Image (cartoon, coloured by chain):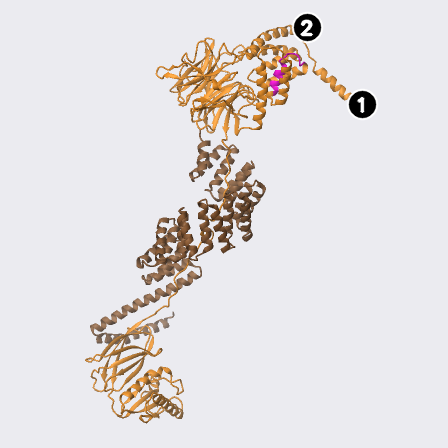
Amino acid sequence: MKGLLIFLTALFMGSILTAQNVDFRRGNFKDKPDEFKSAKEALDKGEEFFKVAFDAVFEVRDPGLNFKKALQQFLIAQELNPDNALNNFRIGVCHYHSSNPHQAYPFLKRAAELDENCDPFLPYYYGAALQLKGEFDKAITYFKKFEDGYKKSDNFSRFVSLRRNECQNAKKAMANPQRVWVDNVAEVNSEYDEIAPSITMDGSEIIFSSNRPNKNKPNEVSDYDHEIFSSYFKDGNWQSPSALKGAVNSKEDDIVNNLSYDGTRLLLHKNNDGQLDIFESTLQGANWSSPEILSRQISSPRANEVYGSYNHDGYNIYFSRDSETRSNGFNIMFSGMRNKMEKNFGAATMVSEVNSRFNDGPVYLHIDGETMYLASQGHESLGGYDIFVSKRVQGAWTKPVNLGYPINTPYDDFFFAATANGKYAYISSNRDGGKGGYDIYKITFWGPPKQPLFDVEDYLLASIAMPIKDPQIEQKVEVNKVSLTVFKGNTIDAISRKPVQANIVITDNKSGKIIERIETNAATGKFLLSLNAGANYGIAVEAKGYLFHSENFDIPAGSEYNLVNKEIELKNIAIGSTIQLRNIFFDVGKSSLRSESNAELDRLVSLLNEVKSLKIEISGHTDNTGSAALNDRLSQERADAVVRYLTSKGIAANRLTAKGYGSSMPIADNATALGRQENRRTEFKIVQN
Amino acid sequence: MDTNTFFSRAIFLVVAVLIFSPIYAQIEEDLTPEERAYRDSIAALNEENEAIAKSQEAYNKGIVLFGQNKPAEAIKAFASSIQFDPNFTAAYFNKGVAENEINRFEDAIKTFSQLIQKDPSYAKAYFQRARAFQGIGKYSEAEEDYKKAIQLDPKNPKAHYNFGTLQFLQQNYDAAIQSFTKTIELKGNEAFALNDRGSCHRMKGDYAKAIADYEAATKKNPNLAFVLNNIGTTKRRMKDYDGAIAAFNRAISIDDKFYLAYNNRGTVQLEKGRLDDAIKDFEKCIAIAPDYAPAYANLAGLKFKQEDYKGGKKAADKALQLDKNNTSALLNRGMINEMLRDMQGACADWKRAGELGSEIGQRFYANNCGF
């Protein structure tokens, strides 16, 4: 506990020691009389400049070089005595009104620490420095403190009120930043001031003013005059700036105001016999002409005119003008060209809708002709100059709206030049974090919030989800391998060899179906037809007065010449005639008739029915294979089987006899297979007619 | 073949010629001119019959191959059949069907056109040729063929159905509704026709009727996950997000590999502000279908919303790797590139999307690119 007490006491004493105000009294600098004398003289000089500048600020006038001159003096005194509250305050104020206002804060803070009552304006300026740092609540406290202590009945209260409102505006704006990027255009900026950017419509060239060192002599505070520079955008970067070509730059400040949309004319303001007027320069080839002062309606002999801007058609001019009779600083004016040939402008009128009680301008008219961007220290600024937008609605300009943070900050943010599509704009600002003084910044507008795309997918048509196959092909067919063979022949009398007209019936033995009935030619006995190859056929031939003739034949598939020739001999029905029944078939080694035999047997039945007088002998024959007894029995049984068939069809038994001859009556050589086939046969013989 | 075999065969041939040539010559001499003409006509007939038989054999072989899911080989067999018998209309038909099956639509059109020239009343040929025309995007020709097929065979539900889908694709939704209704009346594929009619209503903005038809389709066939998916996407449009999620859940319960349902459910989760659930759904979709570009595009959009621009770019890159013409991926990547301060990349993406027909791409490019 005791230790803590000692620590707190030490801390308190230390704070007293570090916060002790040291007056500029000779007694405080007994060992430095010469330095004290110089410091005192500097203080006196500085105070004069300071007073002039201070008064100008409160009258919303340009303080000129007075703060800078004052600062030079105060800094001399500061070297001897850095602990004087009032000097720190004054240095802080000088910085606050410079192009590097962020440098004010440490001096004003020090002044407040040394003696809060060193100057009645200290709370105001300290609050303003805190405002620049974004410490808005704290700043408001100091502004309130200032108001409470400030008893003069002048109109300074409007500045305090403005600052307080700015803090409130800034808090709101910073809580809802705009959808932009603000980037320092480092390629064109320097530690000096870069102001008044103008951009060509295609974004390829930027023109601006800078007081960086140049060929002219610096002024009494070692500042160079502003000259107009140009830089080209190449390969994604701004190139190193160079002074604008031609006779546009002078030995004094040349502040570019606005570039016409076609890029061939520019407005600038400069000193003209002790006051500022607006001039115009035109592009002639690659060089800009010597500036010519604008019409007296704009560049009047009684007031300062600055920040001219062409409107979208290039002939009407908006600009800012101050007035000796008013204390509202510069106001935005408008003058329309009456005669384009004579460049004769009409009387300038104030654009009252957009003006405030403080400095207004620079102004910039967008190419759409309906949008004005203006800088102002008034309206709802976040601090210093801010950029506002106003729209022309039904012929009148709307109340300017702050472009918001981070385009605007508590520092000075002014000038505005946009590309044609409004995506990019360039401004000047002395915000903290730049290269020094005023810098040029590029604003990239994101535009309205972009909503990402989310795809859903569905199969609205079922056939897409499950493709309908329709492979309903036609069915198989039965392959029909039909090959026809020409079957030709003739029917002749077996004995006389004369043609005999006969009826021929051809039967497919496999199916038993009659496939053809033909009658041979009466004169020639010829016949001609086609039969499917690859089948076995029975042919039955009938002719009046002749014995029925039948035979069995194959037409092989793919017959060699597609032609079969057959000569059919017919026999008279004479007693003793023997006719072979070639289409009677038995099971092998048996006497059971096969159904293929029916057609032949039925033709025999027909013959017997037709010729009632016929009596016949059915004879069975075998080849000589096997035993004679067996062949005899088999041939007899086969003859009997035929007789049974015939009787079953109504033929009287007494007209029929059956005889088995075995192999005893061969008609061919049993030594060959063909001969043996010939010998295996059934015959009938006419025994009575 | 050894020398002995060669000589024995040669001798056999010589003998055969010597034996049979005189016989043949004798027969030839015996023939009258009329008989010879008759014999020649039969020989010609035999040749023709032989060709027909070969055509039929090739045709049957084609059917077997087609049944074995070898359409390319089947086409060869049918072509051979046609070569042997140029009048075999069934072979033309089957060849055309096989060509349709493997998307040889130009060939199929040629084949069916030959068939129709031979038999203008072949209704199925018009139907199949219409399918082929549809396959190559010749909708007006397809429409004419479907009309002809319906004229020749008005009770063919498939012709009505396909005609309906064609009308749908041409955005003639009223005509499509009529065709699908006819399909349903003819007891064609009712579930499909109901689904498609529902989609017509949906395209007309009549979501209630669409849902009714979709639900009827699920009653006809409860196992059609895509119909439930359609219910889900329709309810999403109706902003009935809970209903949509329920439908997607049903689709997934039928087919847990139905990646579209996961993707679509993810987009509904987004609408409900359930970003984590949406991510899970998109990732599940990708796990099932790693080549499905829209899921990556959606994931990119979601990560853009989350301001995870690097993650979003990775997803969009993948989507475009899979499908370089995915306009949503291009638009989303453009937005991401913009936020990554790559305006050149952003403008290139928006420009490409615009070239692909995206109005948003064209607008973004016009408003954000150039000066």
Classed neighbour count for the residue bearing mark 2: other residues with Cα under 10 Å, few (<14), some (14–19), many (≥20):
few
Outermost residue, left direction? Answer: A523
The answer as to whether the residues below labels 2 and 1 share one chain is yes
* Residue with the mark numbered 2: A26
Q: In the rendered structure, are the residues bearing label 2 and label 1 in contact, judged by CB atoms less than 8 Å apart? A: no
Instruction: Nearest to the eye among marks 2 and 1: give it.
Output: 1
* Label 2 residue SS: helix
* Label 1 residue SS: helix
Query: Which quadrant of the figure has residue B272?
Result: top right
**Which chain is home to disc 1?**
A
The front one of A358 and A408 is A358
Which numbered tag is attached to residue A2? Answer: 1
A68 shown above or below B299 = above
Amino acid tagged 2: Arg
Query: Which quadrant of the figure has residue A521?
Result: bottom left
Amino acid tagged 1: Lys
Query: Which quadrant of the figure has residue A288?
Result: top left
Q: Name the quarter where the N terminus of chain A is drawn.
A: top right
Of labels 2 and 1, earlier in sequence is 1
- Colour orange belongs to chain: A
**Which chain is home to disc 2?**
A
The front one of A53 and B319 is A53
- In space, the residues marked 2 and 1 are separated at their CA atoms by 42 Å
Rendered colour, chain B: brown
Q: Let me know if residue A119 is in the magenta part.
A: yes
Pinpoint residue A473: horizontal percent, then vertical percent: 40, 60
The stretch in magenta equals A115-130
Pinpoint residue B261: horizontal percent, then vertical percent: 53, 48
